[in-house]
Amino acid sequence: MPVEYLLVPIAFLTSALAGAIGMGGGVLLIAAMPGLVPVAAIFPIHACTQLASNLSRAGFGWRHLQWSMIPPVTLGAVLGAWIGGEVYASLNLHWLPAIVGVLILLLAWMPLPQLPGRGQFSLLALGFYQTGLGMVAGATGPLGAAVLLRRRQQRDWLVVNTAVYMSISHILRVAAFVAIGFSFAPWWHLVVAMVLAVTAGSWVGTLLRGFIPELDFQRAFKVLVTLLALRMIALPFYES
């Protein structure tokens, strides 16, 4: 079995994790991808897989959707995909895992920004930076929580609506990667397998959501994601 298919069970586990607590799965998945697929394929495959993960999670919890969020987030995400795509196209991909590793460490250990505002502009800004930064960092879900937590702290609402804005972000990221020339054709077998895995993971995570103590998980998550991020930072030096 090709080594990249190790990502299929990893994708299932990370999606189940995200289904249970609303975030973290995408960060863990992208941290595991370097070394298993070429650097140029990491972000596009990750975007495709996370689109399925978030879309299925939103679908399983559709009763908690807040539809009024979608137009402003979408508008901001279109602008973010355009600008982020321009930045991504100019990056030196050899150092990309190290850059993402540093960003993941910042997301894991730095306090999330207390973003002002609860109106439509904050949602537009959410779509913009979530998608724009996602083009060059891959997994930025924890940042968006800083906005949604100011609106409501009920877990099901947070998990489902985080999945909604992330779905919008990933749709536009996939479109942007295609626009700048990435071909998914050589990877379609792996992408389909990972999409099926993350959809099943979303279903399992939704069932488990009420049984996971959030505080204990957050501590373990920080340790695990730190080890994976350090691996990403070291990888370009090892391959030089």
Image: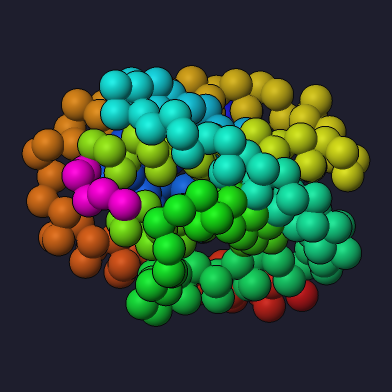
Q: Nearer the viewer, residue 56 or 115?
A: 115
For image coordinates 83% across by 68% down, the residue present is 92
Relative to 239, 60 lies left or right = left
Numbered circles on residues, count: 0
List x then y, in percent, for residue 177.
79, 42
What range of the chain is rendered magenta? 151-155
Quick check: can you spot residue 230? yes
Is residue 65 toward the left or the right of residue 69 in the image? Answer: left
Q: Residue furthest front?
A: 119
In the visual, does 154 lie left or right of 88? left
Give yes or no for residue 22 being in the magenta stretch: no
Please identify the quadrant where the N terminus is shown: top right
Q: Residue, x 12% and y 37% (percent of image)?
A: 210
Residue 150 is situated, as x and y percent measured from the top left of the image, at 32, 58
Task: Name the residue at 51% across, 49% down.
Answer: 120
Residue 181 rendering spot, x and y as whole percentages? 90, 40
Vertical placement of residue 112 versus 89, above or below:
below
Magenta region includes residue 154: yes
Q: Is residue 55 above or below residue 76?
A: above
Magenta stretch secondary structure, dominant: loop
- Is 89 above or below relative to 240? above
Residue 178 point in image, percent of width and height:
82, 36
